[in-house]
Structures are given as C-alpha cells and as structure tokens.
Amino acid sequence: MPLPPGTRLGRYEIVGAIGSGGMGEVYRARDPRLGRDVAIKVLPPAVAGDADRLRRFEQEARTVAALSHPNIVAIFDTGADAAPGTAYVVTELLEGETLRSRLSAGPIPASTVGDLLAQVVAGLVAAHARGVVHRDLKPENLFLTRDGVVKILDFGLAKKAALDRDETAVETQTSAGTVLGTMGYMAPEQVRGLPVDGRADIFALGAVAYEILSGRRAFEGPSPADTMAAILTAEPPSLAPTGSGRTSGAFERIVRRCLKKDPEERFQSVRDLRFALEAMGEAGEAAGPAKPSIAVLPFTDMSAEQNQAYFCEGMAEEIINALTRVEGLRVAARTSAFQFKARGHDVKEIARALNVGAVLEGSVRTAGNRLRVTAQLVDATDGRGLWSDRYDGELADVFDIQDRIASSLVGALRVRLLGDSSPPRSRQRQPSNLDAYDRYLKGRHHRFTTYNLGEALKAFEEAVQLDPSFAPAHVGVAYTLQVLGNYGYLPARGARARAEASLDQALALDAQLPSAHAVRAYLRFMYDQQWPEAERGLVHAIGLDPTDPESHAYYAIFLAAVGRAGEATRQLDRLREIDPYSAWSLAVTGLTWLMLGEFDRAAAEGLKAVEIRPDAVLAHFVAGCALPEIGRANEGVALLERCVDLAGSGVWILSVLGGAYGSLGRVAEAEALLKKIDDRAAASFPLHGWRSLVLVGLGRHDEAMAGLELALAHGETTPAYMRTSLWQALRPHPRFAPLLARVGLPAVTAGPTGRPYSDG
C-alpha cells in the first residue's frame, strides 16, 4: 500500500508520492542529514517477496551507482526498511517530466532534437564503456529536467555485458518464455530471445528518435504479437513528411541505420553513432566537406607474426605527411584518423565523422626483407573505390614505395577532387639507415599508441645513434624528455638540458622543422618562464605548419597560463577543427579550460577523452581535477585514483590525489601519500612543486609556499601553473603574489574562484 507522508525509511522521511513504474513506487523524501530532497523508489512487500524482482531491483541500484555521468540518474543510497520485505533505493530528485509526457504535449522543436539525442548518446557511451547495456530504452525512461538536461532512468533491465561481439553477451531471457524489455522498442534479437549487446540500445534509441521526429511509434500493432512481427519484418514509413522540412535526409539515414534488423548493419557502437550525429551537426547534410579532403587510416598489419603495427602506422603517417604538401587538399590529422583503427567502422561513417570526401585504407605485409603494400581510395559519398594499387619491393625500398603511393594518389585525386593540381612537393629527408627509421617508427608508436614514453625515448635515442643526421628523431628525443621532466619522471634540469641539446641538433639539420620550433617554445615557457620568446616560437611554428595540432595545443596552454582567455579559446577552436577526435587534443583542451577556471568545460572534455581512450592519463587527470570544482568530488577522486594506476604511480599524480584527499578531510590517506612521495624522493630526487599540492590540501600553506619556491629554484615546471585552481588556496598568502611576479605571470585578478571538494 502507498506510504503516507511522514513515513520513515532509514533516515529518510517520505514527503509525498511521485508516481509508480514497473520497478516500484516512487516517492519524494527528505534527507535530514544533508538537508536535501531525494527520490526514493520502493518495492512493496508483496513484490519484494518475489526473489527475481528483488534481484532485478538490487541489480539496478548496483549498476547505476557505478555509472557517474550527468546524463544518467545518480544513485545516492540503498537500504531495507525494518518491515520485512521492503527495499528501497535513493536517487537524485529530478524536476521536469519524462519524454513520454513531453511527447504527449505535442511535437518537440526540431532545433532541440539533436541536442536531446546527443545527451542520451553521451550517457550510453559512459554506460557501455563500463560494460552495461540498458536494454529498456523508451520515452518513459528518458527524463527532461527543467534546466535542459536529459537523464536516463531505470537500469533495472541492464546487466554487465561483453560489448565485444566476439565475446559472450548477455541473454535477454531470464527464464524460459520470459523476454525482458518493452514492446515496440526491443531490437529483433531481443524479441527472439537471442544474446544482446550495446547494439540493442542503439536500435531502441533509433525507435525513440523516430517517434520524436515523426510523432508516431516506429513499430506498433493492435496486439503485442503484431508489434513483435513488425519489429522483425516491417520498415517504418519515411520520417520526413512532404514539405515539412522537419527531418533532414542525413538524420533519416542515421535513424534508419539504428533500426536495421541485423545488428551487424547498425552502428557498431554508440561512439560511432555519436560521431555520425556530430558530423551531421557540424558539416551540415548537403554541404559536405568545404574543400577537397581525405583521411588516411592506419594500414592493417597482414604479416604472419602480427608485430608490425608500428610500421603500418608509420606507412600511413608518411603518406599523410606527403599529402599535406598538396595545395588545396585538406588532410585529416593523424591523431584523429587513427582513432578509428581496428574498430570495424564503416568507411562512409568515418568520412562523415572527419568531414572528408575520401578515405584511404591499406595493408602491409612483410616477409623477411620483402614488403607488399596495398592501398585503396574510397569515395565517401557512395562507398565506391576511386583508386587502388599494389606495391611490391624490398624493405629498403620503403621510402620509394611511400612516394609512389602518394604520387599515385594525387593522380587519382586530381580529376576527382583537385582540378589541375601539382604532385606533392619534396618531403623532409628520410634517414639513410633503415634501422634508424624502424626505431623512429617504434618511438612514434609508443608515443601515440601505447603512451609508453619511456619506451618512446629509448627508441628515439636508438634512431639518433643509428643516424645522427635524422632531424625528426632528435625532436622525438626532445619531446619525450620534456614531458618526462615536466611530470617528474626525470629531474627537471637534466631533462631540460638534454632536450635543449637535441633541439639544437634538429634545428642545425633542418632550421624550418615546425615540430622542433614548437617543442623548443614549450621548453621556453614551461621550464624557463621566457614568455615572449616562447610566444614568438609558437607563432613561427604555426606559420611553418598551420595544420599541426601540437603547435596549437601548446599555444592554447601558453595563453591560458598567462590569462589570455579569448586568444586561448581561438586556439582551441582551431585545434578542434584540425584534430576533433584525438584523446590527447581533447585532454589538452580540457587542461586549458581547467587553467582558465572553466570547470564544466574542462570536465566535459576530459570525460570525452576518457571515453575515446580509457588509458589516457592526462584525460583522467583533467577530469579528476575539474569534477570536484563542480560538486562531483567522489567521481573526481575515483578518476585520479585510476590515473595513479595508469601513470605508474608517478609522484605528480600521487601529489594531486593527496591534495584531493586532504581537501576532502581524508587526512590519513593524504599523509600516507605524502610519506610515499618523501620516501621516493629520498631514493631518487625531490619534486618540490608537485609535493606542495598535498600540503595545500592539508592546509599547511607556509610549507606549500616554500615548496613552490624550491620548485622554481630547481627548474621544475609547476610554477607555470600557479595561476590555476590547483594552488588557489595559496592566493591570499603574502609570498604568493611576489612569486608570481618572479615567474613573470600576471597577478590573479579574476578567474577561478573554486569550490570546496564536496559532492553536496
């Protein structure tokens, strides 16, 4: 029976009924300890006595509690009332209405549909990344809050699932003859009681989108059997009513792909669906790419040993480098194009996501000293092959083969895309030693693909030893040294000196090498605080290669460090245009917003990067630092703890985590990390600047200031971050402003005000 106002469940006091659903009654309640209203979902005693329904109820609570995302309803608590058989779950209280209620009031404005669906997709991306499939998406389970946020409700039918289609998936039948889901939104495989994965949610979302856009259900019959038959055999009518202009052809194609009967023909992940929606929104349906454009995907390793991934990446990257010198041709950045590696993406979908007109894919097979490369150019508009070829030769011929592919590509593109274009201009000199090139490609592979900078440095140094005249390898050495010194894996002064020497070598060999100028500029402002010289170097690097993502990323960080927010934003816009799907670029974007005090934006970019690359250390760091500033401390700390795992327990991230623990009042844990940091310093070298973050969290501000002063004296990079929220608690300290002046940074007169580390 309904619970009257005043009834207590645990510490919660019932205020009134909200509604009911398949999983139980929902009430508004008061949490006196935190002084806030919450929602409580209760299973009545008669239902709670059903072991299967109780299991599903508890499963929902555990599942949703593990998914901390702004587009998924948050779980606060679970419990059982003293009365036998009564169980409940406590969630955030939402103000607004379900999508079903909103649809009953009339059509949703077309201008808001894209954002609504994008928010649902964002929530599903987070859920699927944790191995959770909802399995009951429908308008009743999508809630529209009054401030425009979409929340996914009721994961009562969700289960942990292996999203990889080659692994064991979750079955939709819990017992013979019982199919879980809601009629009209279930995927065909769900209706048949077959195993399902994340593509079932994609089908359901397609049905929801169809209903939003057309005002009618995609599959509906006079009886459940008729509805099931329609799901299995029928195609819904066209979305676009004649003359309405409400639904674009691109949108209809996306919806219909979601509704494919065969899971293999749908989008293969919600990330793919998100890319398609973003590409449609950014590029427009009819306009297509603004100018001739191409994406080069990493070539597939066809060698018997399957140990040539680094070589395949290098082959594609060299072709990218050659094509970037073709006048009038836009080439997608390596870091964005390579995000689509080995995911089974449809070529047309990749082209839409990257907003290019053509895609080059290929394969590499090595056997002894023999090399075979095949390449195919595909038209993005219809999937037709524009050109293909095969190249055979010796490994020693690799540079000639790369040149031949690029030249042949230009010939294939000339008539189709470029008009009367000239062949690519001569490219940078390649190493004379093939082994040096092999080591260089391994360094690039570890830098971009495995994120193992220790192995990257080793490979670049070997390349330099084998061919001291190969300038890009010297830049590779300098880049990895400056990053390892920045984050304290090497002593800062030693790393900086070695990086400087490598850049001297690179620029002596090639004075116009953009990457060398960009890395040197980064050294100038991060290590030396030589702001004007650094800016001149960054501007020069961008002038030499306006399409290089790293130069724009470094410039954005530089501008944020000196407080020039408007200019930093423009650099981020350019970075997004060049490199939209790179986890590193997204993380750097989040870092820039973090430095500027835009914590909501920082968290969003960091979390998006984590979705793309779950092993992205910088992305976890950015999101972990930003989330506590917007009231999501526990989620932020969890990301920082994950960052410790990913970063090999580096002192820099131990310090950030220790500062977070201290600010949360978890003093013992903060002190334990401080001891671990000091023990490591005794065995290797101290990191005064990073260590000061733990002291800030513990409220030991005099010691923290002393740490920052020592960091500057020892050439550490942390003083360049002093204007960020990491050290904002020190701003009232009398020694803070003078130290800012010594570093050459302007005083903090505006910007991040910060919030306490609290989930309240």
Image (cartoon, grey):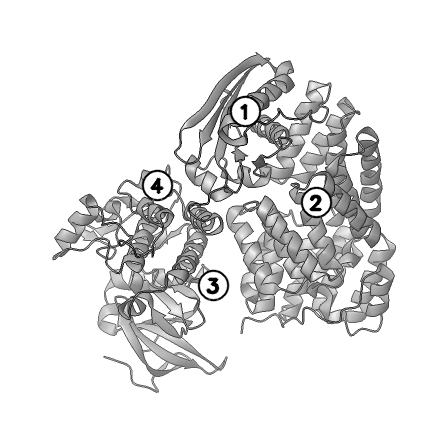
Q: CA distance from mark 1 to mark 3?
A: 45 Å
Find disc 1 in the rendering and name its residue. Answer: 409
The mark closer to the camera, 2 or 1, is: 1
Three-letter code, disc 2: Ser
Q: Residue at x 34, y 45 (%)?
A: 253
Q: Is disc 1 in contact with disc 3, using a CB cutoff of under 8 Å?
A: no
Q: In the figure, is residue 77 to the left or right of 261?
A: right
Mark toward the start of the polypeptide (2 vs 4):
4
Res 195 seen here = yes
At 75% from the left edge and 49% from the top edge, which residue is drawn? 486
Instruction: Read off the residue under disc 3.
Output: 70
User: Marks 4 and 2: in contact by CB < 8 Å?
Assistant: no
Q: Amino acid at mark 4?
A: Thr
Residue 713 falls in image quadrant: bottom right
So how many labels did they put on this image? Answer: 4
Instruction: Report the Cα–Cα distance between label 2 and label 1.
Output: 28 Å
Circle nearer the N terminus (2, 1): 1
Q: CA distance from mark 2 to mark 3?
A: 32 Å
Q: Disc number at residue 168?
A: 4
The image quadrant that residue 104 belongs to is bottom left
The answer to whether residue 700 is visible is no
Q: Amino acid at mark 3?
A: Pro
Mark 1 Cα shell of 10 Å, populated few (<14), some (14-19), many (≥20): many
- Element on which disc 2 rests: helix
Q: In front: mark 3 or mark 4? A: 3
Q: Residue drawn at (37%, 43%), measured in percent from left and top?
A: 267
Q: Amino acid at mark 1?
A: Leu
x and y percent of residue 254 in the render? 36, 47
Residue hosting label 2? 551
